Image: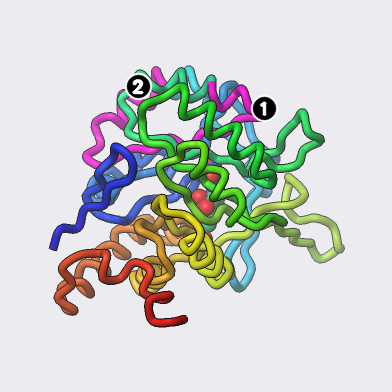
């Protein structure tokens, strides 16, 4: 079976990606990265960021909350010190870009366009500083503006990573599609709050983003709805721990999947997801992913 998937100008050897923020730049575990479809880098901003004070991670029975706060070296250092090393990986490299104004997204795309990276994942789950901190991804017209700007500044593949925090991602996905996105990723973490034994916020950043198995049913729900509303490919993300979870996302309409929190528990998790998918595809004599993608709806679900 041909295991490749193409989104925009980028062909991936298989449909499994390491999710942003959970696999650094893919350089710690190159033997894993090299066998994945690709690695999404942690978010890159124009300026370096130190991130939030500790603690940054809080476990709960359904997953974790994180408040990393977009810690990263900034785009210049990323280009000079990280990209020469990620360019040697055998998988695709997607750069997750995050801005604090609409214009910053355009600047990031323009700066990275000439670098040897394969695609952009546009992270619109950041607070819009000029609009009182509402997330960019909560307003379809802002998603459209960011996507238009990024599209104008790069010929590389553009995938917009949508948020489902207090917003219907169907509308924002349509906006990204209308503005020329090659695909959308669904979903990013959901807002959460963890308290300590004294009833005070546990995380250094006060609130955090929920990820892990607790996210999966809602993420699947979002993928299923968006798949019925747009034609561009969907990258499914949220609580994927094994190959059965990954197949659920394909069945709901995703063409690719991302493994996030599972990699924090086991750095080989994404590879194990891919190995399980391959085995299942062979056992069921699949001839192409299209036999699975979107079957939840084809069966009248
Ligand atoms: C520690 C941590 C850091 C993350 N950093 C980013 C980030 O920089 N950019 C981004 O778009 N998503 C980030 N995410 C969200 C993940 O990429 C993913 O969308 C989310 O965790 C849901 O998938 P999962 O349940 O498989 O972890 C981060 C998640 C975690 C747990």
Q: Tell me the colour scheme of the image.
A: rainbow
Whether the residues at callouts 1 and 2 have beta carbons within 8 Å, the answer is: no
Quadrant of the drawing holding the N terminus: bottom left
Q: Mark 1 points at which residue?
A: 101
- Of residues 69 and 125, the one drawn nearer to the viewer in this rendering: 125
Q: In this view, does 185 lie to the left or right of 132?
A: left
- Magenta stretch encompasses residue 297: no
Cβ of mark 2 under 8 Å from ligand 1: the answer is: no
Identified at 55% across, 72% down, the residue is 217
Q: Where is residue 301 in the image (x, y as percent from the top left)?
A: 47, 81
Residue 280 visible in the displayed image: yes
Q: In which quarter of the image is residue 255?
A: bottom left
Mark in the foreground, 1 or 2: 1
Q: Judge the density around disc 2: few (<14), some (14-19), many (≥20) Cα neighbours within 10 Å.
A: few
Q: In this view, does 277 lie to the left or right of 24?
A: left
Q: What element carries label 2?
A: loop
Q: Callout 1: helix, strand or loop?
A: loop
Q: Give the range drawn in magenta.
A: 79-106
Query: Of the numbered discs in the image, which one, if any, rests on residue 115?
Result: 2
Tag shown at residue 175: none
Image vertical order of residue 271 relative to residue 218, above or below: above
Percent from the top left, x then y, of residue 12? Answer: 26, 47
Q: Where is residue 185 in the image (x, y as percent from the top left)?
A: 48, 51
């Amino acid at each position: 079976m041909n295991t490749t998937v193409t989104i925009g100008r980028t062909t991936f050897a298989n449909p499994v990606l390491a999710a942003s923020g959970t696999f650094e730049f893919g350089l710690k575990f190159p033997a894993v990265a090299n066998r994945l479809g690709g690695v999404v880098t942690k978010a890159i901003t124009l300026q370096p960021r130190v991130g939030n004070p500790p603690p940054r991670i809080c476990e709960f029975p359904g997953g974790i909350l994180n408040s990393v706060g977009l810690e990263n070296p900034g785009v210049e250092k990323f280009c000079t010190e990280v990209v020469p090393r990620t360019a040697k990986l055998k998988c695709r490299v997607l750069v997750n870009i995050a801005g604090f104004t609409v214009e910053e997204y355009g600047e990031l795309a323009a700066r990275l366009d000439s670098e040897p990276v394969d695609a952009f994942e546009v992270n619109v789950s950041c607070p819009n500083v000029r609009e009182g901190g509402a997330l960019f991804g909560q307003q379809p017209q802002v998603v459209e503006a960011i996507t238009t700007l990024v599209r104008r500044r790069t010929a590389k593949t553009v995938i917009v990573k949508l948020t489902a925090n207090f917003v219907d991602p169907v509308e924002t996905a349509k906006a990204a599609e209308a503005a020329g996105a090659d695909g959308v990723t669904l979903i990013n973490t959901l807002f959460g709050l963890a308290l300590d034994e004294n009833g005070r916020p546990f995380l250094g950043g006060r609130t955090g983003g929920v990820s892990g198995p607790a996210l999966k049913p809602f993420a699947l729900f979002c993928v299923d709805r968006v798949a019925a509303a747009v034609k561009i490919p969907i990258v499914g993300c949220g609580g994927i721990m094994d190959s059965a979870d990954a197949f659920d996302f394909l069945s709901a309409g995703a063409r690719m999947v991302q493994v996030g929190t599972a990699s924090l528990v086991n750095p080989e998790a994404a590879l194990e997801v891919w190995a399980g998918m391959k085995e299942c595809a062979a056992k069921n004599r699949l001839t192409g992913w299209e036999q699975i993608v979107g079957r939840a709806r084809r069966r009248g679900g």
